[in-house]
Image (cartoon, grey):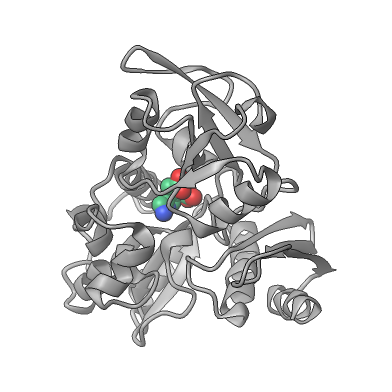
Amino acid sequence: MTNQRIIIGTRGSDLALVQATATEAALRDAFPELELVREVIRTTGDRRTDVALSEVAKVEGVLDKGVFTKELEIALEDKSIDVAVHSLKDVPTVLEPGFEIAGTLPRAPIRDVLVMTVPGGIDALPEGATVGTSSVRRARQLEWLRPDLKVVDIRGNVPTRLRKVAAGEFDAIMLAEAGLVRLGHPMDRVCEVEGVSLHFAPLDEEQFFPAAGQGAIGFEIRSGDDVTRERIASIVDGPTLVRVTAEREFLRLLDAGCHTPVGVFTILDGENLTMAARVFPDEGGEPKTGRVGGSDPITVAKELFESLA
Ligand SMILES: NCc1[nH]cc(CCC(=O)O)c1CC(=O)O
């Protein structure tokens, strides 16, 4: 008899818990009889908020980009969980042996957002303004679009970062629209944090290229766990899976960890897949931008990679 229970592993941040709740709701709809158990797990990335995100993997000696996933994989391996719920953009493109991505929920918006204490878009930032981000991709694009800006590192989860900009530590910070919306902050409303009005300026993906997998909730399982794979298959969003497969394959070909400055996004119109990428050279300077169309995600990724190599 099949186990009538599924244990869902998640990080403990507010955003991670919202994503776990969305996963549970989808499983509840698909399998009303299934018992759902939630296991909250603290990862290295949650623990080491004392050093820059780009340094965490180095000081902890873990696989680059695995800083938010390693402990969840350990729990999968020892069967204390059956599925790990991740923000897919935090998941390495090459997994440790014994694990696989079983799919994704429908994707949220993919844009990056400037969170500012003044209204307006990126042009409303004053000359020399300080912008907080821990992402090299965001830093390089900001400096390329606005060479006068001062980009500085910031750590902490989304609510912590919002408090830091409200407290005046930065003129602006950058966050993903997906995380803000999931935490109940729509783009068209001013957000009040500790008596300060914060304004959202979403940047169109054609202007500011998002991270591979941004806005997608991904499910990681043990390879060979057919029961969980089949259960997850009934809540997977097909179009999202096609898009993130292409984006992650492109990143894999580039051999880029999350600290390599590359933005990429896809558009899926029926069977037609378009993917665009912007890659910044490690040594600095102008980025290369490319765009490719097709239907098979792996082929599209390969062609885009070759056109930029
Ligand atoms: N690295 C942190 C992280 N991982 C996923 C999200 C947002 C949600 C998403 O992109 O799916 C965030 C925060 C942010 O970038 O603002």
The image quadrant where one finds the N terminus is: bottom left
* Vertical position of residue 36 compared to residue 289: above or below: above
Q: Nearer the viewer, residue 80 or 112?
A: 112
Res 3 visible: yes
The image quadrant where one finds the C terminus is: bottom right
Instruction: Give the mark count.
Output: 0
* Vertical position of residue 31 compared to residue 280: above or below: above
- Which residue is at 54% across, 68% downward? 260
Res 69 visible: no
- Which residue is at 30% across, 65% downward? 56
Say whether residue 3 is left or right of residue 161. left
* Vertical position of residue 133 compared to residue 308: above or below: above
- Which residue is at 30% across, 36% downward? 160
Q: Nearer the viewer, residue 116 or 79?
A: 116
Say whether residue 166 is left or right of residue 12. right
Say whether residue 75 is left or right of residue 272. left
Q: Nearer the viewer, residue 107 or 194?
A: 194
Question: Looking at the picture, how far across and down is residue 82, in whole percent?
Answer: 26, 68
Say whether residue 29 is left or right of residue 297. left
- Which residue is at 38% across, 50% downward? 23
Question: Looking at the picture, how far across and down is residue 226, in whole percent?
Answer: 37, 78
* Vertical position of residue 286 compared to residue 305: above or below: above
Question: Looking at the picture, how far across and down is residue 183, in whole percent?
Answer: 40, 33
Question: Looking at the picture, how far across and down is residue 240, in whole percent?
Answer: 60, 58
Rendering quarter of residue 25: top left
Rendering quarter of residue 248: bottom right
Residue at the farthest top position: 195
